[in-house]
Image: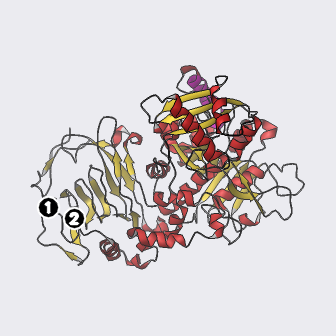
Amino acid sequence: MMKRRHFNLIKTGRRSKLALAVGLALAMSAMGSVHASGNDDTFKNFANKDALMKTAEGFKTQEFKNSTGLEAIGADKAYALGYSGKGITVGMVDTPVYSKHSELSGDKKIQKYGYGSDDLFSIFNDRDHGTHVAGIIAANKDEKGMHGIAYHANLISLGAESSLFGEKKGFFNAYVSNTQNIKNIKIINNSWGSSTDHFDLSKDDKKENFEKEFNESAYYKNLAEITRKYDQINVYTSGNKGSIFSHAYTSGLGIFPEMKDNVLNVMAMNSRTSNLASMTCLAKNAEEWTVVAPGTGINSLDAALKYPFNNYIKKDGTSMAAPYVSGTLALIKEAFPYLSGKQIVETLLSTCNDKFLEDNYTVQLNTDENNNLVAINLVYIDELEKQSDENNKKALGKYYNATIKNETFFKTICDKYGIKNAEDFIRLFSENEIGKIYYLTGKEAYGYGMVDAGKAIQGIGKIITSRLKSQDKSNIFTKESDVYLYSVDTGKKDANYKNRDYTIWSNDIGEELSADGLHAGITKKGEVDLVLLGDNTYLGPTISKDGKIQIVRGVSGNTFAIDNGIIEINGKANEVYSLNGGSTVVKDNITQKEQKPLELYGRMICTQFSGHR
């Protein structure tokens, strides 16, 4: 047992009247006072949402609009804050990419391994899918056509010839054969999957079969090793069969401890409505690592056999949704190069919008590998009461009317079955037991929700305690009850974005209570200053062990500056501690003066804490 430790008391719960006048003046002066680079034109956009939105409007060019899904995920706001994927390389396992497309030109823009050729008459010309995906991720921003979400990112393509090896084996082979070429790449896009593995992994026999393949397959062995050694993130698709279950053997990889933290599953949103795409599989099998992105009518690069290979084409599917997520991860990696793969994933998950659907239901067309209709799934979301037949008919009719002119796949299936209006659709649902009704939670239906790139590049949105581990618990800062601590090492200045000596988390950071009701806090070390710009509501402590944390608008819990740590408080905090040589500065950044004496609210603090475990 560690001995009881004694620390010097600073003061408690200080709230400056001036500093509580939170707004542009406070935020700008707070950041500008600490960092000489505060004159950066993008800098003000972190502090002022109006300035951010005004700057973001300038990125909504025709080229941006031609890119279909960028506005839906807030990419313009990421660009307004200075991020474009520069210096980041994204890997992709797909059919070959036509790298001579003008939108993929540039030094080191794309490196190719595996199958595929840029020759006009090569037998390896099954490259439409891979080229389209590549464009969504990283097509150049060049005032023509469209551009990718991470338009300054580079690509590594591992080309698979699926017709030679079978639907899944070809992609497995592409990864295994080229492991050495992508081991240092943080993000891998996998817009592929088997059309026959949409089954329930919670069933023992199915899970056992998957575990057996995971332990024996060269693909999974390589995947697990690279993930462990190099902290790689793999992005998969939920599938296009309209099942309530995502791909088991790809999206379901998160059931394994080796993969849980570094895998994402992506569903497709209808890009023209407020509904999920009718073909997308839902999140079951992968609820805790699923997100949603635009996936219908997605305009990107066309590699069909036409000269001069600079055309564009629209495609539908979760294959088109996944690269929006991979591109967003590239932006997060650029913004926060010090984050681990796990933390990059958590930044994405914690900033998703889980209120993106207009209605409390969705409709999925469950089809087989030949696009024959297996079922029409009417799925109610977070609905506790069984719905009446009348409500079912209203839901089906509304979905039909919203989708029939706005989604190619939905119209194709309706035409195949002679459905000409909402009444026909409702009738088909009611006949031959083809209609199925499910009641799912939001997590089971769509995981964490719609990706928000503009929010994700502003840092975590909440601390997700379910993704923290038992070793992340501590009670040294709470004396009695445990809290979860989200630990971040901001690293050194020369490894940070633009070599800045600060990094900004500007979201209002909340917390997701753990299953046992524990709160969460943040602990930081590293040379680079961490600026917490938002009005943060997590109730656990804020701890600096090394370097500075600057609290601009405020935190709801206690603060601790320990050892070589510094905490500067410009807004609000609860109880304030400096321990073992740590330093706390309470400063009103409108007047730029330290407050002496401090204005205090609260009680005197006990100076004794038990040793932590």
> Percent from the top left, x then y, of residue 236?
61, 43
> Percent from the top left, x then y, of residue 38?
39, 76
Question: Mark 2 near mark 1, Cβ–Cβ under 8 Å?
Answer: yes
Q: Residues within 10 Å of mark 1 (few under 14, many from 20)?
A: some
Foreground pick, 7 / 605: 605
Q: Amino acid at mark 1?
A: Ile
Query: Which quadrant would the N terminus be assigned to in this image?
Result: top left
Report the residue at 54% width, 21% height from top. Answer: 204
Report the residue at 64% width, 39% height from top. Answer: 422
> Percent from the top left, x then y, of residue 219?
65, 37
The answer to which quarter of the image holds residue 573 is bottom left
**On the picture, is 103 further left or further right than 507?**
right
The residue that disc 1 covers is 10
Q: Residues within 10 Å of mark 2 (few under 14, many from 20)?
A: many
Q: Secondary structure at mark 2?
A: strand
Instruction: Report whether residue 282 is seen.
Output: no
User: How far apart, in angstroms, are the residues tagged by discs 2 and 1?
Assistant: 8 Å
Report the residue at 27% width, 49% height from top. Answer: 540
Q: Residue furthest left?
A: 604
**Residue 259 in the image: above or below residue 306:** above
**Residue segment shown in magenta:** 206-219
Q: Secondary structure at mark 1?
A: loop
**Does residue 448 show up magenta in the picture?**
no
Instruction: Report whether residue 436 is seen.
Output: yes
**Residue 17 in the image: above or below residue 482:** below
**Residue 172 in the image: above or below residue 17:** above
**Does residue 217 show up magenta in the picture?**
yes
The residue that disc 2 covers is 584
**Magenta-colored segment: predominant secondary structure:** helix
- Figure colour scheme: secondary structure
Foreground pick, 320 / 498: 320
**On the picture, is 47 further left or further right than 474?**
right
